[in-house]
Amino acid sequence: MPVRKAPRTRAGITATRDETDLDRAATLQLVIALARAVKEIDKWVRPHLARQGLGGTEFAVLEVLYHKGPLPLGEIRDRILVTGASTTYIAKKLERRGLMRRRPSGEDQRVVFGELTPAGRKLIGDLFPVHVEHLRQAMAGLSVQEKRAAGHLMRKLVQHARGAGRGGVPRG
């Protein structure tokens, strides 16, 4: 059976149907591997956060405010990858616990900032180093060089996926 030609690849080289099928299989295997890795890493960190009465999203809000300072809720939403309604819900929960507060912008009343309270700063300041150690233990199967290489590849993947989602394919 003759090999049929498939669409041109990014490098401009024509791929065969077999190469395209291999690419599809490798793509699916990668997506499954990424999902499984996140699931297993989550098993290392979730109990630690739960002991502090926090879920992953609550921790993410505290962490971004700890490292970036006060931010508009919309920017928090974009950084932790949740919906606007979820961000407001989480902010209210953390506010009720006295860990963060919301305050309107002095320049634009449509903008609401989130900021840590002293209690929130103390909690995340104590919790973050332990969290990083849990992550380190979960990823101890990789060398520093492998972690850096994987990080580089993930950033490259994110950059391409962002462009593809907007209808364009970035060059890289």
Image: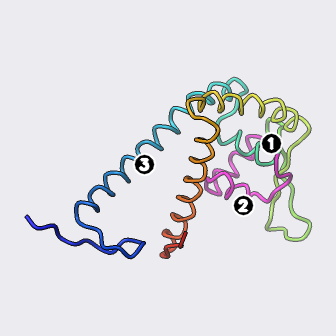
Q: CA distance from mark 2 to mark 1?
A: 17 Å
Query: Disc 3 and disc 2: Cα gap in Å?
Result: 28 Å
Q: Is residue 155 left or right of residue 11?
A: right
Q: Which three-letter amino acid code belongs to the residue tagged 3?
A: Val
Q: Earlier in the sequence, mark 1 or mark 3?
A: 3
Q: What amino acid is at disc 1?
A: Glu
> In which quarter of the view is residue 18 placed?
bottom left
Label 2 or label 1, whichever comes before in sequence order: 2
Q: Residue at x 71, y 31 (%)?
A: 131
Residue 23 percent across, percent down from the top left: 33, 57
Identify residue type, mark 2: Gly
**Position of residue 121 measured from the top left corner of the image (x, y, whole percent):** 87, 38
Q: Position of residue 163 (x, y in %)?
A: 53, 70
Mark 1 and mark 3: span between their CA atoms? 36 Å
Please tell me whether the stretch drawn in magenta is mainly helix, strand or loop. helix
Residue for point 49% across, 73% down: 169
Which quarter of the rendered picture does the N terminus lie within? bottom left
Q: Which residue is mark 1?
A: 95
User: Residue at point 85% right, 47% down?
Assistant: 101
Which residue is tagged 3? 31
Mark 1 falls on what kind of element?
helix
Residue 152's label in the rendered image is none
The residue that mark 2 highlights is 74
Q: Find the magenta span and give its range.
A: 67-94
